[in-house]
Image (spheres, helix red, strand yellow):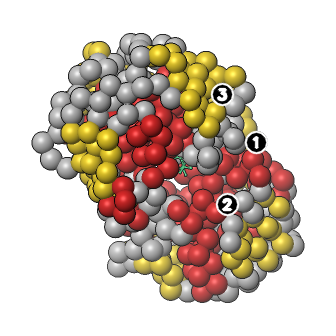
Amino acid sequence: MDITIEPGEHLQGQISVPGDKSISHRALILSSLVEGPVEIEGLLEARDTLATLNCLQKLGVEFQGDNKALKVKGVGIRGYREPDNVLNAENSATTARLLLGMLSGQPFFSTLTGDDSLRNRPMGRVCGPLKQMGAFIDGRGKGEYLPLYIRGCDLMPIHYQLPVASAQLKSALLLAALFTRGVSEIIESVPARDHTERMLAYMGGRLVKQEKKITLLAPFALKAERLQIPGDVSSASFFLVAAALHPHGELLINEVGINPTRTGIIDVLKKMGAAVKILNIRNCNGEPVADLYIQGGSSLKGIEIDGEMIPRLIDEIPVIAVAALFAEGETVIKGAAELRLKETDRLRVLTVELKKMGAVIEELPDGLVIKGKARLSGARCSSHGDHRIAMALAVAALSAGSETVIQEAEAVDISFPGFFELLQRITAVKLSAG
Ligand code: S3P
């Protein structure tokens, strides 16, 4: 589907964004391991999280209701049944990698696949340590790529230093460790999002975190009656940047998760000079939540982003690149080679697509150099099937000189169904689908 967006002259309102994608995946998986019913409130109902839900259904877990109140009939730690067909993670690496960890500890055989994009994303980083724990995993490309088959078993605990800052890898190992007897230790080099650790602790898991070391003592029973999912700061980031770029922008975004492992975007916007405020901080199942208020019209300046900041904003780099186009001076992003391994090679795709609009942007092996104060003109661009590229291009389109067409715009449904409708509501721009 193509979406045509005209430049916007107005941006104002109070909005909510859908539930956090990372927390939603974890809520589905961990609730299914509780013995008894768990109600999840505010689950993200998008293609990625529905892929997790469908896989869990094939493992014998029953669900009832919708995102307002989804009832999960947890089967307990030993309650999954062997799936009678291939499990499909579709576009979702979180589904694939977290399930690989969990399936490795099951006393049965399973097969996992995904769509064209996911079948080209590396799984070896997860399979390696899972094989060390005793799982038998093999598949395409010497067992590095989906489809993979898994013969699970009684796993051994693991002591493992993560070679990459990946929350998916960390979470896969923590989930596998649930099905062991003994003490597992996982050491991070650079901290990545910690939603799995927080939710396990909230559900009574025996888990200790000391600086970069996570220690898990298995087995234990998981307990919860109700989980609430805050709004996704990654989804909010597109609206934060759109408002920051608009001379009279003003936006209040309610109930957004502000876990410090995820809020690099807020720090970066502040450093660039944007007027963002974090209001009414509260707690939601062990996760901090707040309302975010932003006013546009500040002049932004280019900055350098690298090091430990990168995992805190890895998914927001596409929209940060758009903000940088309108800042004074140069923005340099380094240490983000992982972006080449996402739904698309985001460093390449961003460079190609933003250049079509007149951006001065250069690709580095591990980052981007973006020249500010661009005069963007509308163009015919493509999301390449990547949800975050589609939404970043839409934000750029609002500040372009003429109308922009985004091809494969339906990719937004991966993480943010209703994105274009919400954008239209607060900007009143002409937006047409074709
Ligand atoms: C995620 C972790 C990150 C992130 C992805 C979601 C998660 O990926 O980019 O969108 O929910 O654990 P990596 O673990 O590959 O860094």
Assign a secondary structure to mark 1: strand
Sequence-first tag of 1 and 2: 1
Query: Is 341 above or below relative to 325?
Result: above
Answer yes or no: disc 1 within 8 Å of ligand 1: no
State which quarter of the image contains the N terminus: bottom left
Query: Is 147 above or below relative to 308?
Result: below
Query: Is 185 above or below relative to 109?
Result: above
Measuring 37% from the left and 63% from the top, which residue is drawn there? Answer: 141
Please indicate whether residue 414 sits to the left or right of residue 352 in the image: left
Assign a secondary structure to mark 3: strand
Tell me the residue that label 2 is attached to. Answer: 336
Depth check, front residue: 208 or 11:
208
Depth check, front residue: 13 or 171:
171
Question: How would you rate the neighbour count of disc 3 (Cα within 10 Å): few for under 14, some for 14-19, many for 20 or more?
Answer: some
Question: How would you rate the neighbour count of disc 2 (Cα within 10 Å): few for under 14, some for 14-19, many for 20 or more?
Answer: many
| Residue 51 visible from this viewpoint | no
Sequence-first tag of 1 and 3: 3
Tell me the residue that label 1 is attached to. Answer: 277
Measuring 23% from the left and 42% from the top, which residue is drawn there? Answer: 110
Answer yes or no: disc 2 within 8 Å of ligand 1: no
- Which corner quadrant of the image does residue 42 belong to? top left
- Which corner quadrant of the image does residue 63 belong to? top left
Give how far across and how far down residue 198 sits, in percent: 56, 25
Measuring 43% from the left and 78% from the top, which residue is drawn there? Answer: 407
- Whether residues under marks 1 and 3 lie with C-beta atoms below 8 angstroms apart, the answer is no
Give how far across and how far down residue 260 sits, in percent: 69, 36
Q: Real-space Cα distance between discs 1 and 3?
A: 32 Å
Sequence-first tag of 2 and 3: 3
- Checking the image for residue 213, the label placed there is 3
For discs 2 and 3, the disc positioned in front in the rendered view: 3
